[in-house]
Image (spheres, rainbow, N blue to C red):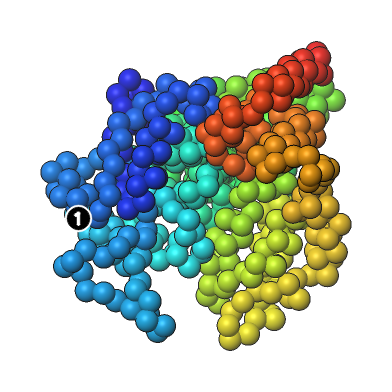
Amino acid sequence: MKSENKPISIAYVDDDAYCTRILPRLLQVEGMCPPEYNKYKVDIKTFSSLSDFEKSVNIKLPDLTLIDIVHPPSKKDQLKTDAFGFIDNKWFSFSLIKKIRSLHSDAIIFVYSNHYDQETKDRFFGAGVDHFIQKDCVELKQEIIDNYQIVKKIRQSKKENLIPLRPHYFGDTLAKLELKVRDIILNKTDKNCLITGEIGTGKKIVLDFFEDNLHKNKHSYIRIDCSDLEVSKKLKKMHPDDFILCEEISLLPLFVQDILLQNSSIKIIATSNIDLNILVQQGEFNNDLYQKIKNNVFHIPPLRDRRQEIAQIANGLARYSFKEGPVTITKDAMEVFEGNDWHNANVKELHDSLFSMLKYLKEDRLLKTYMLPIDLVQLGEQQKSIYGRNKNKVSVTFEINTMDYKDVEDLILVSSIKASIKKFQAINITQVARVLRIPRATLVVRMDRMPAHHRLKINEMFKVCKRNKKIACG
């Protein structure tokens, strides 16, 4: 990525005058994003028509193109209508995106739109779009910067002869982890590393990613399943500077751990679903080996801690993982998936549940709720009260003859903010906006318009919540 001092040039294309006016403020004004993102500067140029943008691209390609997919047709465009006679406006930006991609293979193109159904995403990903951002995104600058870095690194990986991991399969968490893996393979960080996480979170996928790229770059390596009784024989074949890929290293017998320590020049890439520090204290794992790999730990959170990725992972698995061909998950079935804890095997459990539904498939290739395993549906219903749409209701009581509409609106917002602080331990405006799922900038503007006594009360609650968190952390 470019140095932090050099702004990222962004071309924003949208026929909505309000959006082209407000978006530069959201990206350039400090306080509109988490503080750690203020160091990233952007130079944004807006375009109200596709034709104006096309002329600009022919002169200079921006670092990032941010484009809305629905645009009115220009005079030279032939109006294409669907079966109901409506103009398919999406095709006008679609054809331009394909043209840019064909002329500039390294171009980074994000769609910024309210149209983000899976069919639309698939169509535009096929045209060369790198990422979709919803127009109601709460942390817009954070979303743009994070994904710009990911795509930039993937582009660089291709130039450096690395095989990129497919983020739509496994979620954005593993896509960000890929950047760290890439640095290890390219000799930029400590070679030894430990990948931790519960069963089925994706540790094996990351180890596969290591193996694929080590093989492609002709590095010498040995991959071992630490539960294999013949593992010591495999390790006797290792050479200095070899990579040793250890699957579930906690299962490795102590005498085999001693073999690994005999050669100080080998690089160990290990996975574990058990806290090795506890095993060291119990005398069941070699402390020297633990010290060697603990300085570079990558933790993969369980699915229940990244529920926002469940739909992304489920749709990726449904479309690309089955030899029978792609399938589509209905909205009701997806709600069950998102409401489940997946505490038994995380992504693996999700994959197995999808696979068990295939036998009920019909010609429409839709995975519906009645196809789900019964225990999964029952568990989803039990957890819906915790993680579903009815989570933490907020009740507001007022007298309609004593308050005007603005007062009622303020009361509802204040009650929602207070609930976010009390029930979610939100300690600032950014966290409240994330809980309420509204843009941070919108929330700041609305709070500025509130009566002073409401703002003082909210700020006091923030201080109390911060103080309580510090006490809890010791």
Left or right position of 474 against 31: right
Q: In which quarter of the image is residue 422?
A: top right
The residue lying toward the viewer, choosing from 380 and 113, is 113
The residue lying toward the viewer, choosing from 458 and 91, is 458
Which residue matches tag 1? 51
Residue furthest bottom in the image: 363
- Residue 308 seen by the camera: yes
Which quarter shows the N terminus?
A: top left
Q: Which amino acid does label 1 sit on?
A: Ser
Please tell me which residue is depicted at 15% across the width and 50% down the height of the picture: 55
Left or right position of 459 against 207: right
Q: Position of residue 205 (x, y in %)?
A: 57, 49
Could you tell me which secondary element the residue under label 1 belongs to?
helix
Left or right position of 293 against 59: right
- Residue 186 seen by the camera: no
Q: Quadrant of residue 91?
A: bottom left
Which quarter shows the C terminus?
A: top right
The residue lying toward the viewer, choosing from 432 and 447, is 447
Q: Position of residue 219 (x, y in %)?
A: 41, 39
Q: Position of residue 124 (x, y in %)?
A: 38, 61
Please tell me which residue is depicted at 64% across the width and 54% down the height of the picture: 310
Please, is residue 93 above or below residue 81 in the view? above
Residue furthest left in the image: 59
Left or right position of 299 against 251: left
Q: In which quarter of the image is residue 206?
A: top right
The residue lying toward the viewer, choosing from 195 and 220, is 195
Q: Residues within 10 Å of mark 1 (few under 14, many from 20)?
A: few
Please, is residue 251 above or below residue 431 in the view? below
Q: Where is residue 102 in the image (x, y as percent from the top left)?
A: 22, 58
Please tell me which residue is depicted at 24% across the width and 55% down the height of the picture: 50
Please tell me which residue is depicted at 62% across the width and 43% down the height of the picture: 437
